Each structure stands twice: as C-alpha cells, then as structure tokens.
Amino acid sequence: MRFYPLFFRAAFSWMDAERAHRIGFGAIRAVHACGLGRVLERFTAPAPSLATEAFGVSFPSPFGLAAGFDKEGRGIAALAELGFGHIEVGTITGQAQPGNPKPRLFRLIEDRAVINRMGFNNDGAAAVAPRIAAARAALEARYGARRPVIGVNIGKTKAVELEHAVDDYRASARELAPLADYLVVNVSSPNTPGLRLLQSAESLRPLLAAVREESEWAAGRRVPLLVKIAPDLSDEDVDDVARLALDLGLEGIIATNTTIGRENLASPAETVEAAGAGGLSGAPLKARSLEVLRRLKAAVGDRLALVAVGGVETADDVRERLDAGATLVQGYTAFLYEGPFWAAQVNRGLARRSAPAVRA
C-alpha cells in the first residue's frame, strides 16, 4: 500500500498536475472498464460495520470523495470500486464552461497540498445529467440497498452575473436534483469571481430557498440539501450560516472548501508565489477546517448533518472529525498523494477502531 507515494514521486511529481490527474483518473476508469474493479473490490469494499446513515440516506462508509475529483460524472462507478462510501460529483454549472486558463493546478509537495484555480470547468448540467443517471442505475443494479451514494455539487456559471445567480442555480437543480442522493450548493470556491459574496446570510437565504423549491419540484421528492462554506469565513459568519441552515431546514453543511490563505507553509515562498491565485487544499487546511466543524457542531447540535473536509489524510483524521461531530467525512487532496487504495486503507483503519456512531 505504501508503494504508491514512491511511484507518485517517480511518475507524477514532475508532471503538470492537471495532466497527471487526467492520466490517473483515466487509469482508474480503465480498470473498471475491463472488469478488474470487481476483483479489486474484494479488498477495497468497506466493512459492513462502517455503514452510516445521514439525512435519511444509507452510506456504506462515512468516508467519501469530495467534489472536484470527478467534475463531470465520468467515473462514478469506477471510484465506487475503490471503497468510497459516497462520491460527490462536480462542481457542475448551469452552462458548460472551459474553466480558467491553464496551467491552473499546482502541487505543494512539501505541504501535501494543492493550489487550484480550475474555475468550475465542466460540460454543464444538461450534459452531465445522463452520466449520473447511468451511473446511479449501474450502482443500484450491482449493490442494491448498500450502494455507494452519489452527491451532486452545483455552482454558478462564470458568465452569469450575480444578480442572475438564483436562476442559474435553479437550472442546475432542475436537471440534477432528480438524480442526486443529496444536493450541495457551492458558494465558497475562490475561483469564480464574486461567488463568495453569496455566502452572506442575506444573499444565501433566497438562493437556498430557490434551490430547495426547484429541486423538490423537479425530483418529486425532498432531496437532501447542503451548503458548502469556506474556511475563510469569520466565526461570526460561520454562526450566521449555521442559523440560516437551521431556519431554512437544510439537511447539512459541508465544512470546508479551499482557502485563499497561504500561512505556515513549508514550501519555498517562490514556489507558492509562482503557483499564483487559487484555493489551497490539503494538510495545511486541517486545523481551520476542524475548528469550523467544532464551531458548527456547537451551533447546530444534532439538528443537521455536518460533513467535514479539509486536510483529511488518515483514518485517525476521519475518526477525529467524527468525534468532533461530523456525520460524514470527505477527502480529495490526499487521494492525489496516496493513490487508488487510499479509501480502502482509511476504511480498514476505521473498522479497526470500531464502527462509527450512526447519526441522523
């Protein structure tokens, strides 16, 4: 299992990060396409003791893959074979868009971190929807009631002005909510100009209310709705979001997205500066994301689900987040450094430390 970090340094560390991601993700999909994923799954499937329930949905494991890895729903079934309890697809926008100019993804290897300014590059909600539908049908046929969960993360199209953001999110919800086990409103990426302004309670209230209304109308059911927030919010703003989520009856909050901060990094200053603007993810985010989680837990108690993400690398990190009040935990950046057996390794560690408590 520890072979991959050595392989990463030899094969990928020198390569453009986005190209390396494309090659690695392609290999994961190829393993699935040729049927080897079913063989691997004998070793990667989560232990039954890890089964968890959140907002009325059953998860095979509390540990899942955060949005950003599979932006367009191209590898959901392949990723499920690696042991993730859920795969959050996206971020998906109402309209197709190419994202920001390349290069736009950079590693800080000394920090086990990544800086990205991808800019929600994706094919748009209408194009992604059929892929999610096909993946959901395949997972249901294969796993039945214990299938991995599909979350769908939606954001604002860059070309859409902020005053029209609600309609843009509505368009995505209309296409994607019927296919989602849960839906996430992303207002916290630093890579779409003005997006984070929507995190204020005044702007967030009508947006979340509109997505709730549109998703229920399109799906004909109540689709669990969560909001994803940034670690850069002040404590007072975190409290405001918690109150708003409770007031609107949301099912959960995801904490946290990437940070625009660059404090306490081990990487040379010139390397960090050369990477430029973008959101920082990975190990340096651990302390703040855990701090935000604990603050949210104090504010909401058990009244909604909290999904912890940011600096999660090991089973101990996952357990720490669960003990701090998270219902589910997500990772992403460590996947790039640890390789395809990372989720299985985390799940085995969790199973050894006893099954997580089941929270509503």
Image: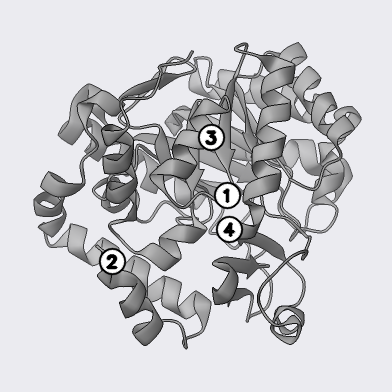
Q: Residue at x 65, y 14 (%)?
A: 301
Query: Is residue 292 at least partly visible in the picture?
Result: yes
Q: Which mark is residue 321?
A: 3
Marks 2 and 3 close (CB-CB < 8 Å)? no
Residue 203: percent from left, percent from top:
87, 33
Q: Residues within 10 Å of mark 4 (few under 14, many from 20)?
A: some
Q: CA distance from mark 2 to mark 3?
A: 24 Å
Q: Is residue 147 above or below residue 88?
A: above
Upstream in sequence: badge 4 or badge 3: 4
* Residue at the image point whose x is 45% and y is 82% from the top: 13
Of 92 and 339, the residue lying toward us: 339
Where residue 22 appears, as percent x and y from the top left, is 41, 72
CA distance for labels 1 and 2: 33 Å
Residue 350, relative to residue 54: is it above or below? below
Name which residue type carries label 1: Ile
Dot 2 or dot 4, earlier in sequence:
2
**Mark before the other along the chain sequence, 1 or 4:** 1
Query: Which one is in front, 280 or 197?
Result: 280
Q: Quadrant of the N terminus?
A: bottom left
Helix, strand or loop at label 2? It is: loop
Could you classify mark 2 by the number of other residues whose Cα lies within 10 Å: few (under 14), some (14-19), or many (20 or more)? few
Residues at marks 2 and 4, CA–CA distance in whole angstroms: 18 Å
Picture coordinates of residue 348 (x, y %)? 26, 42
